[in-house]
């Protein structure tokens, strides 16, 4: 399996589970989903380091994506709940989106430079 699959399975499972994790966070509370997501994320990172086959590595990487999907909406809810619903909250969301886009741009330019 090409190395690109190792990276794409993480984003694929994270994106696929993101809406469902956000709905669960709305139902049971962002704090609960955040704690479970961080616990699962750290568990799967540790399990991935002890994987002995490529299939185990890919499965744990995919499960890390699901755990990250639990972390993202709960974190955004915490930030939004801690800020007033005014200009400061909008600024925080805009900065979060820009930082994610800048990270993607940095990865893209790094790949282009090394190719």
Image (cartoon, helix red, strand yellow):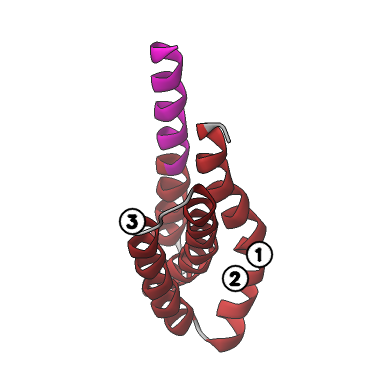
Question: Does dot 2 land on a helix, a strand or a loop?
Answer: helix
Question: Does dot 1 land on a helix, a strand or a loop?
Answer: helix
Q: Position of residue 53 (x, y in %)?
A: 47, 51
Q: Earlier in the sequence, mark 2 or mark 3?
A: 2
Q: Position of residue 12 (x, y in %)?
A: 62, 49
Residue bounds of the magenta highlight: 100-115
Magenta segment's dominant SS is helix
Residue 87 appears in which quarter of the rendering? bottom left
The residue under label 2 is 22
Which of discs 3 and 1 lies nearer the camera? The answer is: 3
Residue at (39% x, 12% y) in the render: 113
The residue under label 1 is 19
Residue 27 appears in which quarter of the rendering? bottom right
Quarter the N terminus occupies: top right
Q: Nearer the viewer, residue 62 or 53?
A: 53
Question: Does dot 3 land on a helix, a strand or a loop?
Answer: helix
Q: Position of residue 93 (x, y in %)?
A: 46, 54
Q: Earlier in the sequence, mark 3 or mark 1?
A: 1
Residue 20 appears in which quarter of the rendering? bottom right
Instruction: Say if the magenta span includes residue 38.
Output: no
Residue at (42% x, 34% y) in the render: 102
The residue under label 3 is 49
Kindly indicate whether the residue at mark 2 contacts the one at mark 1 (C-beta within 8 angstroms).
yes
Which of discs 2 and 3 lies nearer the camera? The answer is: 3
Q: Nearer the viewer, residue 54 or 62?
A: 54
Residue 63 seen from this side: yes
Q: Position of residue 17 (x, y in %)?
A: 63, 63
């Amino acid at each position: 399996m090409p190395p690109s699959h190792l990276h794409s399975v993480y984003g694929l499972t994270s994106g696929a589970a993101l809406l469902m994790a956000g709905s669960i966070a709305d139902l049971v509370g962002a704090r609960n989903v955040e704690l479970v997501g961080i616990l699962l994320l750290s568990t799967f990172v540790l399990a991935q380091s002890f994987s002995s086959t490529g299939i185990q590595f890919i499965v744990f990487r995919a499960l890390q994506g699901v755990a990250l999907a639990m972390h993202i909406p709960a974190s955004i809810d915490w930030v939004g709940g801690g800020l007033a619903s005014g200009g400061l909250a909008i600024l925080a969301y805009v900065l979060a989106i820009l930082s994610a886009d800048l990270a993607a741009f940095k990865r893209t330019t790094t790949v282009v430079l090394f190719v």
